[in-house]
Image: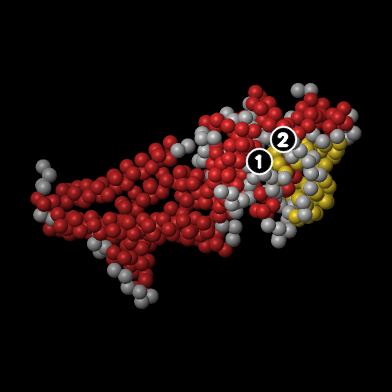
């Protein structure tokens, strides 16, 4: 479904992604972990071309993401994204946040878009918040709205860029619960996170990155029990012991 | 004591001046807003040539005195064979001068909308134009209202520059009244009063708008 072949990316002189090879199958949940600045978010953001790659090949389905002829807007409609800082539209009510792209990008009739939106709000557990503004919600609620906003496009893939990093500790659980149920329903998910518990519980695969490289790739049980790479061991000892 | 006959005997002059000042201000206001928006879009466009043109325009007109901009139209253009009267060249000068400030206000407003908003919109499959139309500009407008109304207030007051080039505005007629009455203090006090009649409602309207925007989250 998603395939990186020898992908490199530079920010000016900074080499952010180095020879990335990664294949993600349909229905797989891949969790990307690693120290900050290791290129995890950049890797994720390349998938829907929020970042462009410098060389190599990146395909989603049959689409070459960085091909000049690729219809990027069409591709992005198939890929939902959830950000660390939610990025809800503050000037729109929750319901309008969710229906904007289905109406404007997919051309759905307003009524249908609203029904879909309410369905997903129900699913993330806050159907009663449809008519409030994002600023009236807690962080956890805002992030769940952002997830509903992504799902309302009925995407094939969901990308999560540190979805719980900006949340108060007591709100992390409610967001992770939504993500877990999504994973169980078979959504293809790529998740950048520091939530090792989430990785252990629902990931099919853990990808460990350091300094722009994928250093280790393993099933979560193996990765957490006996990481092969020294850098992964060091990272885990730092994260888990706190 | 204020000599009210200054007003009662010259109300026609004041009225014509007020009308012309209002007229010049409205035209310059509409023109500078349109022109300023275009220049702002130039300045944030990814095309280098447009960026350079926008920057050159802003730096030029923002950094020379208004009087010289008006002279460009009033004295400069006739040298090229295009003669404009004081009213037209004054209004054009005012428009061009103000548009540079408005361009900067609009540009700052657009840039003040967090990058994450654009990313969220674009990543959901909205086009660049849709993203601007539905997500960025509605938020930029709220940020831009206070500085733009400031510029509009300045514009109305700066329109007194027309008086220097015989532009038949309130200031010009004020000078005529003064030449007639020799009552400088009262004459110009009434001129100031008429400017306030134009500017106070504008300031009040801008406060209302800010409050409305503040309420809608």
Q: Quadrant of residue B82?
A: bottom left
Q: Is residue B25 left or right of residue B117?
A: left
Q: Residue at x 64, y 32 (%)?
A: A124
Q: Is residue B195 left or right of residue A53?
A: left
Q: Earlier in the sequence, mark 1 or mark 2?
A: 1
Kindly identify which chain the residue marked by label 1 belongs to: A
Q: Quadrant of the C terminus of chain A?
A: top right
Task: List the residue tagged with mark 2.
Answer: A182
Asked which secondary structure carries label 1, the reply is: helix
Graded by Cα atoms within 10 Å as few (under 14), some (14 to 19) or many (20 or more), the crowding at tag 2 reads: some
Q: Are marks 1 and 2 on the same chain?
A: yes
Cβ atoms under marks 1 and 2 closer than 8 Å: yes
Task: List the residue tagged with mark 1.
Answer: A151
Q: Residue at x 44, y 59 (%)?
A: B35
Coordinates of residue A114 in the picture (x, y in percent): 56, 41
Of the pair B165 and A89, the residue shown nearer to us:
A89
Q: Residue at x 19, y 47 (%)?
A: B189
Inter-mark Cα distance, 1 to 2 = 10 Å
């Amino acid at each position: 479904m998603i395939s990186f072949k020898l992908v490199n990316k530079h920010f000016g002189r900074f080499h952010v992604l180095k020879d990335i090879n990664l294949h993600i199958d349909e229905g797989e949940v891949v969790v990307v972990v690693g120290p900050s600045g290791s290129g995890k978010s950049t890797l994720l953001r390349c998938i829907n071309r929020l970042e462009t790659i410098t060389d190599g090949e990146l395909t989603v389905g049959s689409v070459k993401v960085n091909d000049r002829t690729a219809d990027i807007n069409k591709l992005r409609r198939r890929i939902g994204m959830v950000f660390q800082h939610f990025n809800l539209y503050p000037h729109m009510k929750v319901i309008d946040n969710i229906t904007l792209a289905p109406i404007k990008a997919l051309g759905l009739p307003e009524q249908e878009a609203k029904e879909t939106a309410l369905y997903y709000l129900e699913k993330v557990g806050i159907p009663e918040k449809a008519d409030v503004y994002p600023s009236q919600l807690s962080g956890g609620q805002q992030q769940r709205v952002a997830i509903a906003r992504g799902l309302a496009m009925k995407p094939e893939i969901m990308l999560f860029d540190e979805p719980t990093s900006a949340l108060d500790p007591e709100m992390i659980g409610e967001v992770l619960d939504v993500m877990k149920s999504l994973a169980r329903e078979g959504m293809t998910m790529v998740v950048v996170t520091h939530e090792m518990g989430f990785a252990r519980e629902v990931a099919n695969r853990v990808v460990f990155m350091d300094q722009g490289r994928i250093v280790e790739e393993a099933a979560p049980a193996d990765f957490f029990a006996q990481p092969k790479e020294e850098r992964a061991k060091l990272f885990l000892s730092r994260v888990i012991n706190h | 004591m204020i000599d009210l006959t200054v007003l009662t005997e010259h109300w026609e002059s004041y009225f014509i001046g007020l009308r012309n000042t209002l007229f010049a201000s409205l035209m310059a206001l509409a023109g500078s807003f349109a022109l300023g928006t275009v220049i702002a879009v130039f300045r944030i466009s990814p095309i280098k040539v447009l960026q350079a043109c926008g920057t050159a325009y802003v730096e030029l007109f923002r950094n020379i005195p208004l009087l010289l901009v008006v002279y460009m139209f009033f004295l400069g253009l006739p040298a090229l064979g295009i003669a404009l009267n004081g009213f037209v060249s004054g209004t054009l000068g005012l428009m061009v001068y103000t548009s540079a400030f408005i361009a900067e206000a609009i540009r700052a407003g657009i840039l003040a909308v967090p990058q994450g908003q654009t990313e969220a919109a674009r990543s959901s499959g909205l086009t660049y134009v849709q993203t601007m139309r539905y997500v960025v500009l509605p938020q930029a407008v709220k940020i831009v209202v206070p500085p733009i109304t400031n510029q509009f207030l300045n514009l109305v007051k700066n329109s007194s520059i027309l008086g220097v080039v015989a532009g038949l505005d309130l200031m010009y007629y004020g000078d005529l009244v003064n030449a007639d009455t020799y009552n400088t203090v009262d004459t110009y006090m009434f001129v100031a009063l008429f400017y306030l009649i134009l500017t106070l409602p504008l300031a009040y309207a801008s406060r209302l708008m800010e409050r409305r925007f503040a309420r809608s989250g």
